[in-house]
Amino acid sequence: MSGCAQAVSYEERCVEVTNYLIQNLGAKELEIIRYNEEDQKLSNHIKIHLQQIEAKCREAKVHYKIINSNVVDDQLATKLSSSVKTLDVSCFTKYHVLSLLKTGRFKKVVYAPALVHNPPMQVIHQLKAVQVPGYSGLRVANRDDFLFILAGFEGYRALNIYKLLAPRVCVLCIGVPWFEPASLVKYVSTAMEQNIMTVASTNVRIETVPSTDAHAFAARFVSLVKTYVQRHESKPNIVTVPLGTKVQAVGLYLAHKNLPEMQVIYPVPERYEQISRGFGKIVEINLDRDEVSQQLDTSIDRQ
């Protein structure tokens, strides 16, 4: 098969997905992105996991290359070889998931979900908010801003970006495991609790969106945005902030073809904290353009 790109992380799932890329997908070339991490504890975890990944590559005679990057490196795509067609999104920042997919070079996405997600132990302030390359959209100065936040358990990031952008309307999109109804109440209640300061604002609306299926998310999100836009007396700006799952980020990329006017903003925290542990069943997401387009159009019609 063609080459694969993945990010090494302080989360142990990055090592497990390397096994999958080599054993299940037959990867013969692996390009490993190593983010700069100032926190010594997290940096040590990254170092250990990178050593484990390198050992697996040597054992399987897989050619690998290590690429250093920061979390919002807008030139990362140019550093990857042209042979890389599969993207493991498990440990990339959502800024990079979205910007790399927008190049159109990837045919398949691989994702290893974390087994446990815990809310952050401390409040982490926002360092800056940046526009994601390829998602500049159309933002007109004299129009109202409609802000769609894909909310997870990092409520402080949602609140910071809400205050910064000061939208006319904010839609907090709470992710739920669409096909796991038994987990729905737990996920929604935890997300609502973590985002309580934003939820309390009078111009905030609450909606649920799929968190574990990219195509289902894309269909639901496109329908949701169009519904809110149609209700407004004049055409608003559409601004989206991805703070949910990596699968939702993939779904946002899929949805963008139906929402080209949408701008995507990524809030960069001053530091990261390990809030995900373990790993679940690894999934593959097909990005074949014709098939994806047909599935999305059909799903939107059913909404």
Image: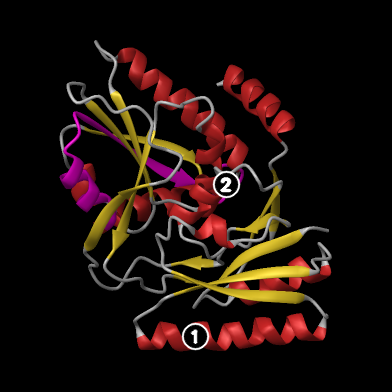
Task: Report the magenta residues as a range.
Answer: 157-182
Viewer-nearest of discs 1 and 2: 2
Asked which quadrant contains residue 264, the reply is: top left
What color scheme is it? secondary structure
Mark 1 touches mark 2? (CB < 8 Å): no
Q: Does residue 128 sit above or below 277 in this rendering? A: above
Which residue is rendered at x = 53% and y = 40% of the image? 253
Residue 177 appearing in the image: no
* Image side of residue 22 versus residue 300, left or right: right
Residue at image position (70%, 75%) is: 64
| Image quadrant in which you'd find residue 137 | top left
Check disc 1 and report its element: helix, strand or loop.
Answer: helix
> So how many labels did they put on this image?
2
Residue 26 horizontal/vertical position (percent): 84, 65
On screen, residue 264 above or below 260? below
Q: Is residue 151 above or below residue 277?
A: above
Q: Which residue is mark 1?
A: 45
In the picture of the structure, the residue carrying the numbered disc 2 is 101
Task: Identify the residue shown where x is 57% and y is 36%.
Answer: 254
Asked if the magenta segment contains residue 168, the reply would be yes
Q: Label 1 vs label 2: CA separation?
A: 27 Å
